[in-house]
Amino acid sequence: MTFQQLAYFVAVADVRSFTRAAESCGVAQPTLSRQLMALERELGAALVDRGGRDGPVLTPAGAALLPLARRMLADADTARTAVAEIVGLRSGRVRVGATPSLCIGVLADALRVFHDQYPDIALELSESGSQPLVRSLVRGELDLALVIVPPGGIDPALHATPLLRERLSVASPTSERAPSRGSLNLHELGRRHLVMPRKGYDVRETTLRALTEAGVTPRFAVEGGEMDAVLRLVEAGTGLAVVPDLVFAGRPRLRRTVLTPPLYRTVALARRADLAPTHAMRAFTDTLLSFLGVLSAGDGFTGDVQVIRPTAG
């Protein structure tokens, strides 16, 4: 007995015509007839009465087999779907974007965990500011991206899942005296030379907006670099920088000083809202959420970072 034979039998039962059944199955009528007779020989009973005036009708044996055949074919289709999903995971691709600070603080380790679990999925990483990443998502150049939620909300073309709430703090070199005893306010920050990342970094826009609202004119030592360059310049004593708390991990040459009043940002995982996520994208999302949960339950993060638990749906 084969699934193909059962499919031919169900087709005959549905349309009550060997010719139309063969057409619906995409085979020649003699081929369908031979396979149906082979099935009857296998089961030891006639399944179809071919002498009916209105076309073939099911015998009692055929009527008993029909619901079982339908269920077997449905189960086979379910099995094919399940296997196809696994095959998709083995041969899929995920194009992930993230801001440099998130690549440093979270994504590098999460990508390692994902690669260990799904070694055959191709991973492509794009590192840029949050605003360029959003544009890349909208244009379909990325599948997923860790982006910063702006004050006005995320682009309506995107679906975003909030992941982290992170504080921004002042970075200074440990080789020099601390800029204050405990905290630094915006007016004190305005009297220091700053190292500022290039345009497109949300931390730049957030810092400049806070200084402007406080009536403070910033003084720049260097501006326009990428996050790695900003951190290295601070370590070298070039100036201070306002940076996300995640970047302090593993950098003993940087001192963290809290800023008052505090500045926070929300990190979200975003994708195109009009496209259903692929199996590989869902697997990456599940891996990332699981990784953040384990990290939060363990030693946690450096500085003031909280995991936002995604709500169902």
Image (cartoon, rainbow, N blue to C red):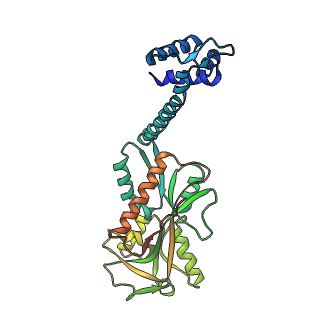
Q: Answer above or below: position of 124 versus 196.
A: above
The residue under the point 36% across, 63% down is: 294
Query: In this view of the protein, can residue 240 be seen by the observer?
Result: no
Residue 150 occupies quadrant? bottom right
The residue under the point 42% across, 75% down is: 304
Q: Answer above or below: position of 212 versus 268.
A: below
Q: Position of residue 130 (x, y in %)?
A: 53, 62
The residue under the point 47% across, 61% down is: 99
Q: Residue furthest front?
A: 60
Quarter occupied by the C terminus: bottom right
- Taking the image as shown, residue 275 lies to the left or right of residue 291, namely right
Q: Residue furthest right?
A: 54
Q: Position of residue 211 (x, y in %)?
A: 55, 81
Query: In this view of the protein, can residue 259 be seen by the observer?
Result: yes
Quarter occupied by the N terminus: top left
Out of 177 and 268, give the one closest to the viewer.
Answer: 268
Q: Answer above or below: position of 152 versus 125.
A: below
The residue under the point 59% across, 15% down is: 49
Out of 117 and 48, give the one closest to the viewer.
Answer: 48
Out of 101 and 269, give the one closest to the viewer.
Answer: 269
Q: Position of residue 187 (x, y in %)?
A: 51, 87
